Amino acid sequence: MSTEPAAAAPLGILLISGTHEHAHYAFVLAAAAAALGRRVVLFATGAGCLALCTDWSGLQEAGRDAGIRARGVAGIGELRESAAELGVRLIACEAGLRIDALDPALLLPGVEVAGVASFLEAAAGGQIISL
Protein backbone atom coordinates (compact mmCIF):
# COMPACT_ATOMS: atom_id res chain seq x y z
CA MET A 1 0.00 0.00 0.00
CA SER A 2 1.29 3.45 -0.91
CA THR A 3 2.12 5.97 1.79
CA GLU A 4 1.82 8.77 -0.74
CA PRO A 5 -0.95 11.32 0.08
CA ALA A 6 -4.05 10.73 -2.05
CA ALA A 7 -3.72 14.15 -3.69
CA ALA A 8 -0.18 13.29 -4.83
CA ALA A 9 -0.89 9.70 -5.90
CA PRO A 10 -1.23 9.20 -9.64
CA LEU A 11 -4.63 8.73 -11.21
CA GLY A 12 -4.98 6.22 -14.01
CA ILE A 13 -8.04 6.47 -16.20
CA LEU A 14 -8.80 3.45 -18.38
CA LEU A 15 -11.15 4.38 -21.22
CA ILE A 16 -12.52 1.26 -22.89
CA SER A 17 -15.84 2.67 -24.06
CA GLY A 18 -16.33 4.45 -27.35
CA THR A 19 -19.31 6.49 -26.15
CA HIS A 20 -19.26 10.24 -25.91
CA GLU A 21 -20.52 10.12 -22.33
CA HIS A 22 -17.64 7.94 -21.10
CA ALA A 23 -15.01 9.82 -23.10
CA HIS A 24 -16.34 13.18 -21.89
CA TYR A 25 -16.23 12.13 -18.27
CA ALA A 26 -12.77 10.59 -18.66
CA PHE A 27 -11.52 14.02 -19.70
CA VAL A 28 -13.51 15.75 -16.92
CA LEU A 29 -11.78 13.51 -14.37
CA ALA A 30 -8.37 13.88 -16.00
CA ALA A 31 -8.49 17.68 -16.13
CA ALA A 32 -9.87 18.02 -12.59
CA ALA A 33 -7.29 15.69 -11.05
CA ALA A 34 -4.45 17.38 -12.93
CA ALA A 35 -5.72 20.80 -11.81
CA LEU A 36 -5.46 19.51 -8.22
CA GLY A 37 -1.83 18.64 -8.82
CA ARG A 38 -2.14 14.91 -9.42
CA ARG A 39 -0.17 13.05 -12.06
CA VAL A 40 -2.75 11.69 -14.50
CA VAL A 41 -2.49 9.11 -17.24
CA LEU A 42 -5.44 8.45 -19.53
CA PHE A 43 -5.13 5.12 -21.33
CA ALA A 44 -7.61 4.44 -24.12
CA THR A 45 -8.16 1.12 -25.79
CA GLY A 46 -10.52 -0.26 -28.41
CA ALA A 47 -13.26 2.19 -29.35
CA GLY A 48 -12.07 4.44 -26.51
CA CYS A 49 -9.09 5.33 -28.73
CA LEU A 50 -11.49 7.43 -30.83
CA ALA A 51 -11.44 10.01 -28.00
CA LEU A 52 -7.71 10.48 -28.62
CA CYS A 53 -8.08 11.03 -32.36
CA THR A 54 -7.87 14.50 -33.86
CA ASP A 55 -11.40 13.92 -35.17
CA TRP A 56 -13.33 12.34 -32.32
CA SER A 57 -16.68 12.43 -34.16
CA GLY A 58 -16.58 8.64 -34.48
CA LEU A 59 -17.54 8.31 -30.82
CA GLN A 60 -21.03 6.95 -30.27
CA GLU A 61 -23.48 9.80 -29.66
CA ALA A 62 -20.83 12.42 -30.54
CA GLY A 63 -23.65 14.85 -31.32
CA ARG A 64 -24.46 15.23 -27.63
CA ASP A 65 -21.36 17.45 -27.31
CA ALA A 66 -23.20 20.40 -28.89
CA GLY A 67 -25.98 20.15 -26.30
CA ILE A 68 -23.45 19.97 -23.47
CA ARG A 69 -21.66 23.09 -24.70
CA ALA A 70 -25.00 24.89 -25.22
CA ARG A 71 -25.71 24.35 -21.52
CA GLY A 72 -22.40 25.99 -20.57
CA VAL A 73 -20.46 22.80 -19.85
CA ALA A 74 -17.07 22.21 -21.44
CA GLY A 75 -17.16 19.86 -24.40
CA ILE A 76 -14.59 17.25 -25.32
CA GLY A 77 -12.53 19.73 -27.34
CA GLU A 78 -12.14 22.13 -24.43
CA LEU A 79 -11.50 19.33 -21.96
CA ARG A 80 -8.82 17.78 -24.16
CA GLU A 81 -7.10 21.17 -24.45
CA SER A 82 -7.24 21.63 -20.68
CA ALA A 83 -5.90 18.14 -20.07
CA ALA A 84 -2.99 18.80 -22.44
CA GLU A 85 -2.19 22.15 -20.81
CA LEU A 86 -2.25 20.50 -17.38
CA GLY A 87 0.18 17.77 -18.44
CA VAL A 88 -2.14 14.76 -18.59
CA ARG A 89 -0.31 11.85 -20.19
CA LEU A 90 -2.37 10.35 -23.02
CA ILE A 91 -1.71 6.79 -24.16
CA ALA A 92 -3.49 4.90 -26.94
CA CYS A 93 -3.29 1.14 -26.57
CA GLU A 94 -1.28 -0.35 -29.40
CA ALA A 95 -3.39 -3.52 -29.43
CA GLY A 96 -6.60 -1.51 -29.14
CA LEU A 97 -5.68 0.51 -32.21
CA ARG A 98 -5.04 -2.69 -34.14
CA ILE A 99 -8.25 -4.36 -32.97
CA ASP A 100 -10.37 -1.43 -34.14
CA ALA A 101 -8.22 -0.88 -37.26
CA LEU A 102 -7.37 2.70 -36.24
CA ASP A 103 -4.33 4.30 -37.82
CA PRO A 104 -2.01 5.86 -35.19
CA ALA A 105 -1.60 8.81 -37.59
CA LEU A 106 -5.17 9.82 -36.65
CA LEU A 107 -4.17 10.49 -33.03
CA LEU A 108 -3.70 13.92 -31.49
CA PRO A 109 -0.13 15.18 -31.43
CA GLY A 110 1.61 14.02 -28.27
CA VAL A 111 -0.48 10.88 -27.76
CA GLU A 112 1.78 7.94 -27.01
CA VAL A 113 1.15 4.50 -28.47
CA ALA A 114 2.04 1.85 -25.90
CA GLY A 115 0.75 -1.21 -24.13
CA VAL A 116 -1.09 -1.83 -20.91
CA ALA A 117 2.19 -2.37 -19.02
CA SER A 118 3.09 1.28 -19.66
CA PHE A 119 -0.29 2.35 -18.26
CA LEU A 120 0.05 0.19 -15.16
CA GLU A 121 3.56 1.48 -14.53
CA ALA A 122 2.39 5.11 -14.86
CA ALA A 123 -0.53 4.52 -12.48
CA ALA A 124 1.45 2.42 -9.97
CA GLY A 125 0.64 3.29 -6.39
CA GLY A 126 -2.41 5.32 -7.32
CA GLN A 127 -6.04 4.89 -8.24
CA ILE A 128 -7.34 3.41 -11.47
CA ILE A 129 -10.78 4.33 -12.76
CA SER A 130 -12.33 2.42 -15.64
CA LEU A 131 -14.92 3.96 -17.96
Image (cartoon, helix red, strand yellow):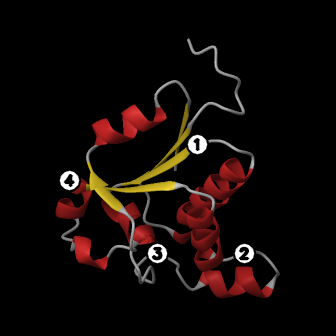
Residue 119 in picture, x, y percent from top left: 38, 41
Q: Residues within 10 Å of mark 2 (few under 14, many from 20)?
A: some
Query: Residue placed at 26% from the left, 45% from the top?
Result: 115
| Distance in Å between CA atoms under marks 4 and 3 | 21 Å
Q: Are marks 4 and 3 in contact (CB under 8 Å)?
A: no
Q: Is residue 118 visible?
A: yes
| Distance in Å between CA atoms under marks 2 and 4 | 30 Å
Give the residue type at disc 2. Answer: Ala
Q: Earlier in the sequence, mark 4 or mark 3?
A: 3
Residue 60: numbered disc = 3
Q: Is residue 21 left or right of residue 71?
A: left
Residue 35 in picture, x, y percent from top left: 72, 53
For disc 1, the marked residue is 39
Give the residue type at disc 4. Answer: Ala
Q: Quadrant of the N terminus?
A: top right
Q: Residues within 10 Å of mark 1 (few under 14, many from 20)?
A: many
In the depicted structure, whether residue 115 falls above or below residue 56? above
Label 1 residue SS: loop
Q: Closer to us: mark 4 or mark 1?
A: 1
Q: Earlier in the sequence, mark 4 or mark 1?
A: 1
For disc 4, the marked residue is 95
Q: Earlier in the sequence, mark 2 or mark 3?
A: 3
Q: Residues within 10 Å of mark 4 (few under 14, many from 20)?
A: some
